[in-house]
Image (cartoon, coloured by chain):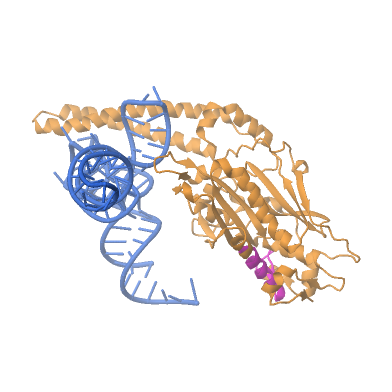
Chain colours: A orange, B blue
Amino acid sequence: MLDIKLLRNDINKVRAALEKRKENIDLDAFIKLDEKRRQLLYKVEQLKSEQNAASKQIPVMKKEGKDVSELLDKMKKLSDTIKELDAQVRETDDELEKIMLTIPNIPHESVPVGETEEDNVEVRRWGEIRKFDFPPKAHWDIGEDLGILDFATAAKVTGARFTFYKGLGARLERALINFFLDTHTQKNGYTEVFPPFMVHRNSMIGTGQLPKFEEDAFKVYNTDYFLIPTAEVPVTNMYREQILDGNLLPIKHVAYSACFRAEAGSAGRDTRGLIRQHQFNKVELVKFVEPETSYEELESLTRDAESVLQLLKLPYRVVKICTGDLGFTAAMKYDIEVWMPSYNRYVEISSCSNFEDFQARRAGIKYKKNPKDKARYVHTINGSGVAVGRAVACILENYQNADGSVTIPEVLRGYMGNIDIIR
RNA sequence: GGAGAGGUGUCCGAGCGGUUUAAGGAGCUGGUCUUGAAAACCAGUGACUCGAAAGAGCCGUGAGUUCGAAUCUCACCCUCUCCGCCA
């Protein structure tokens, strides 16, 4: 959510940002409503002030034996008016909030202006793309041939876009989760969190998944709970409606969770394999930082995410996302894309974003350095560190051998009972 | 799921429906005293939201009753105890 003061005082900045994002939102309606709200508020507060004064007088007058019935009559009318105005204020507030919740974040000035992912800007590359001296297979074929991935059985049991991992496939998934968590806790200084996989509506609003993208989420029947689309949601909301001790910042958490996405708009894309599933595992990095440092912190978080790919020796590139492709909540975003031979291109395996105070304002997360300071909103930053299913796909494809076997990356062997090859 | 108890300011903890703009502690800040500290004493300090200010709001959340609600009513949420069920 944007600062309402920004909308009042610098509406053109917001218009420009929406323009860059190719978003069309009626800001004039907002301005009008806000004007109306302030007028109402002024009126009702004056009346309340009068009411409060009378409330103090009445007991005094009664004590003195004076007749208060006339005053009571007057106050009755006043009370009715106040109730009516209060209702109007509430109504206006609700409408304003509705609009506020649908206005996306303002892109950072350094974000390249563009319309689609075509306009994203590559920042750096790491690793050598492997040249195969045999025709490489796609990971879904490798996985099925080795008997470690089973899409058909998952379709029978649940439906499309689910997977059974079996044997060493399941073990590889688990190994990666542990490897990621261990690396980020032991080398990169994150504190591990294991969150709930369901959250209530307010948490989803807090991080920006709702109210705009409800069709992308799985709702749990008969409850107000949603399956989390990412650990970002529960972990960020850990501190909702809280004023943090600024001396504890930055707070850095790493969390494993399963993620659940309905992704209404993605039918027909990436239909085969592990790339786009309704349920997948992810290790997520989340930081709460002071505003002054948030862009440095985004850089270091991105490096932390990259570090696990380097340890796995998977070639990747980092891309800076342009304004038209930027997520609703982000002010700046890097995607880390890993080389996927079956796609013959780089495929996203991590998104690292700085939300500035956009989520913090929605979720009410503030901090104070000193008890006497005014509370300020923190900046939140997060990124995948990294998506586990896509990492499996990437390993299977990049580490495949001519005979159909797959070599285990060295750093994972300790997690795999010292197995060095799946055949 | 059933029964009971409870949710008040940073913490503990009062609060007959009306000068409560929340008592009293603790804590914190400053001072007196002291070689210094502690103790004692004195003074100050109450989050947060909107607002330029005046002012308004805020006692788990939301509705309601009333001229007036922390205080009454209803619903919901959460915590604790006991019972049932259970990985």
Residue A270 occupies which quadrant of the picture? bottom right
Locate residue A15, reporting x and y percent. Answer: 62, 30
Please, which residue is most extreme toward the left here? A65
Viewed as shown, does residue A359 lie left or right of A77?
Answer: right
Q: Position of residue A154 (x, y in %)?
A: 69, 69
Q: Residue at x 23, y 27 (%)?
A: A74
Residue visible at 50% across and 35% down in the picture: A96
Q: Quadrant where the C terminus of chain A lies?
A: bottom right
Res A411 → quadrant: bottom right
Q: Nearer the viewer, residue A358 or A50?
A: A358
Quadrant assignment for the N terminus of chain A: top right
Foreground: A45 or A407? A407
How many labels were placed on the picture? 0
The answer to whether any part of residue A329 appears in the image is: no
Residue A164 lies in the magenta stretch: yes
Chain part drawn in magenta:
A158-181
* Image location of residue A204, percent across then percent down: 54, 51
Q: Position of residue A114 (x, y in %)?
A: 74, 37
Q: Is residue A180 above or below residue B27?
A: below
Question: Most extreme residue toward the right, as rendered?
Answer: A133
Q: Give left or right: position of A151 versus A341.
A: left
Residue toward you, A271 or A296? A296
Asked whether residue A301 is drawn in magenta, I would say no
Q: Please tell me which residue is depicted at 78% across the width and 43% down the height of the picture.
A: A118
